[in-house]
Image: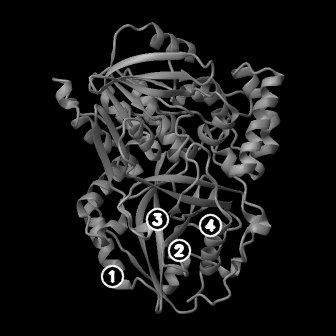
């Protein structure tokens, strides 16, 4: 995103403005950002507030996949799959360079489920719903060219299919950028202390700035809670019962040279048959995911557990035994909490991923759903309140999901770099390149990130803390050993010049970031991680 006003100016607008907002959106993840954009494009006066940083929660900690939900076909949810694959195709077209195609390879071994024909039938339906056609099954010899390092014993062949991947935090920022251009206002580190009511109907919020601790009381016709897994908190303040089941999904990141995959490789975990994957992402290999009940405090960061590390490494050892992967190979880990509607199923993985919308005493709660369908979720939410805004029920102008990106002619950039910048920054890509200082169009080793992206984020993207810059504006904290510790002296120069941080502020930010990284993004103590080396020969 690029903010046209400073934080101080935006807060002054809130404090001084006597006119009520049409909508206040609580929550700065992909659901809230999508609602903000759709509402702004309908000409509504809309404000989004986030108590921490944009995409701080689930929307920076997902599996980074923009997928159609292949497994939903097995469950008979054809309409959900159809909507998902169509949204996936639109995102790949509208945000090329940010949402990118990713081929998935699934090996077919003698005696291993699912069988070839069952899987092939699902893929035919999957492609049909997306309007695609293609070859899916490959011989054992050809499949090993697509997915090297997998065991050859009992390999019959394998299937490939297309999905997509993204940088989830950057997708949120791109949506917020579009919303800002459409006239919306979004502020991070502005917490909702309480929702106010009149005649038992929500009519505003009391806000507190996490920076200055100043409070603001703001009115609106509609309050929308898009707080994901935290939605029950606001609902319970008005006496509603909890309806969400927080589930944790954890991931590992390894160097691409240590776990080399050209395609994404999917497999069923040898222990419980759950799907696990590894795929190339931002210059590293990303392994995921778990799916377990999360019983910890939702107000705290979450981290991978020792058991989850062992679970994911066991899957990699099962699929790539000859690589002999070790814990020392792991660069970083991360964990996110999914907002899943609780239906009481014993197996967390069996809970549905549909979104839910509840209107209770004037508070509209939107939660659940998939990253891929954020636009459809936003449109569904606005349908529930359309009667309050006559004449704004629909955006009557046909338009692209995103504003077309500026054309880059910079000779120092190759095609992949130019496409990446266009996808991540849209119409501001050219402006970003222009602010690059000497050497800042270079790519940071081990990543796909350019140095100038740090400068741009610090100058234009509402960075309040070093962790915002390292974990969400860029993903260097996930992509580099020790959270990018070796780069901090150079990053310090950028932050001090762009954010006016003095030496004391920098030292405090660096200390807080490294402490956070070591607690939540490093591995648990090695001695606590169970033995995961799979002694069985994979089939």
C-alpha separation, residue under disc 2 versus residue under disc 4: 28 Å
Residue at the extreme front of the image, as rendered: 239
Residue at 46% in and 21% down:
206
C-alpha separation, residue under disc 3 versus residue under disc 1: 19 Å
Q: Earlier in the sequence, mark 3 or mark 1?
A: 3
Mark 3 or 1, closer to the camera: 1
C-alpha separation, residue under disc 2 versus residue under disc 3: 10 Å
In the rendered structure, find residue 118 and report the number of the disc placed on it: 1
Mark 2 or 4, closer to the camera: 4
Q: Secondary structure at mark 4?
A: helix
Q: Earlier in the sequence, mark 2 or mark 4?
A: 2
Mark 2 or 1, closer to the camera: 1
Q: Characterize the local packing of mark 4: few (<14), some (14-19) or many (20 or more) Cα atoms within 10 angstroms.
A: many
Residue 230: give x, y in percent of width and height.
47, 43
Q: Secondary structure at mark 3?
A: strand
Mark 4 or 3, closer to the camera: 4
C-alpha separation, residue under disc 2 versus residue under disc 1: 21 Å
Q: Earlier in the sequence, mark 2 or mark 3?
A: 3
| Location of mark 3 (residue) | 103
Q: Characterize the local packing of mark 2: few (<14), some (14-19) or many (20 or more) Cα atoms within 10 angstroms.
A: many
Q: Secondary structure at mark 1?
A: helix
Residue at 73% in and 18% down:
500
In the rendered structure, find residue 308 and report the number of the disc placed on it: 4
In the rendered structure, find residue 146 and report the number of the disc placed on it: 2
For the residues labelled 2 and 3, say whether their Cβ atoms are less than 8 Å apart. Answer: yes
For the residues labelled 2 and 1, say whether their Cβ atoms are less than 8 Å apart. Answer: no
Residue at 67% in and 81% down:
321
Q: Earlier in the sequence, mark 4 or mark 1?
A: 1
Residue 462: give x, y in percent of width and height.
58, 26
Residue at 20% in and 31% down:
386
376 left or right, relative to 293: left
Q: Earlier in the sequence, mark 2 or mark 1?
A: 1
């Amino acid at each position: 995103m690029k903010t046209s006003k400073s934080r101080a100016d935006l807060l002054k607008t809130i404090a001084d403005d006597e006119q009520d907002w049409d909508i206040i959106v609580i929550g700065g993840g992909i659901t809230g950002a999508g609602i903000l954009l759709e509402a702004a494009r309908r000409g509504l006066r809309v404000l989004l507030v986030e108590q921490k940083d944009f995409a701080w929660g689930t929307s920076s900690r997902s599996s980074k996949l923009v997928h159609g939900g292949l497994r939903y076909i097995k469950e008979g949810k054809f309409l959900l799959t159809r909507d998902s694959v169509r949204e996936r195709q639109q995102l790949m077209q509208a945000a090329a360079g940010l949402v990118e195609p990713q081929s998935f390879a699934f090996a077919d071994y003698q005696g291993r489920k699912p069988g070839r024909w069952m899987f092939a039938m699902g893929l035919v339906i999957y492609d049909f719903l997306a309007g695609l056609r293609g070859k899916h099954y490959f011989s054992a010899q050809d499949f090993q060219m697509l997915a090297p390092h997998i065991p050859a014993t009992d390999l019959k062949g394998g299937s490939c299919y297309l999905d997509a991947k993204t940088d989830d935090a950057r997708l949120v920022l791109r949506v917020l950028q579009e919303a800002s251009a459409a006239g919306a206002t979004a502020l991070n580190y502005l917490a909702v202390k309480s929702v106010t009511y009149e005649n038992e109907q929500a009519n505003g919020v009391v806000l507190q700035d996490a920076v200055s601790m100043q409070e603001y009381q703001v009115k609106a016709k509609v309050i929308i809670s898009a707080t994901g897994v935290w939605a029950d908190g606001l609902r319970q303040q008005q006496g509603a019962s909890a309806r969400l089941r927080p589930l944790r999904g954890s991931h590992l990141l390894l160097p691409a040279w240590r776990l080399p995959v050209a395609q994404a490789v999917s497999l069923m975990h040898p222990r419980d048959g759950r799907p696990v994957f590894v795929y190339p992402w931002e210059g590293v290999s990303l392994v995921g995911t778990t799916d377990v009940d999360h019983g910890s405090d939702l107000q705290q960061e979450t981290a991978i557990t020792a058991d989850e590390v062992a679970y994911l490494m066991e899957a990699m050892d099962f699929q790539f035994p000859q690589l002999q992967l070790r814990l020392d190979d792991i660069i970083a880990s991360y964990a996110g909490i999914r907002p899943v509607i609780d239906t009481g199923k014993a197996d967390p993985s069996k809970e549905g991923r549909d979104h839910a919308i509840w209107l209770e005493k004037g508070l509209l709660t939107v939660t659940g759903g998939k990253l891929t369908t954020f636009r459809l979720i936003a449109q569904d939410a606005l349908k529930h309140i359309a009667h309050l805004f006559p004449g704004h029920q629909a955006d009557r102008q046909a338009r692209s999901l995103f504003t077309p990106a500026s054309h880059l002619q910079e000779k120092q950039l190759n095609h992949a770099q130019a496409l990446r910048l266009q996808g991540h920054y849209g119409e501001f890509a050219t402006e970003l390149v222009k602010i690059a200082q000497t050497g800042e169009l270079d790519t940071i080793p081990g990543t796909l990130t350019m140095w100038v992206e740090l400068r741009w984020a610090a100058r234009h993207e509402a960075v309040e803390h070093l962790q915002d810059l390292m974990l969400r504006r860029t993903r260097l904290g996930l992509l580099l050993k020790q959270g990018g510790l070796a780069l901090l002296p150079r990053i310090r120069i950028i932050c001090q010049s762009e954010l006016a941080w003095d030496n004391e502020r920098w030292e405090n930010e660096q200390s807080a970031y490294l402490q956070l990284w070591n607690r939540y993004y490093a591995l648990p103590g090695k001695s606590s991680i169970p033995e995961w080396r799979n002694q069985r020969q994979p089939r």
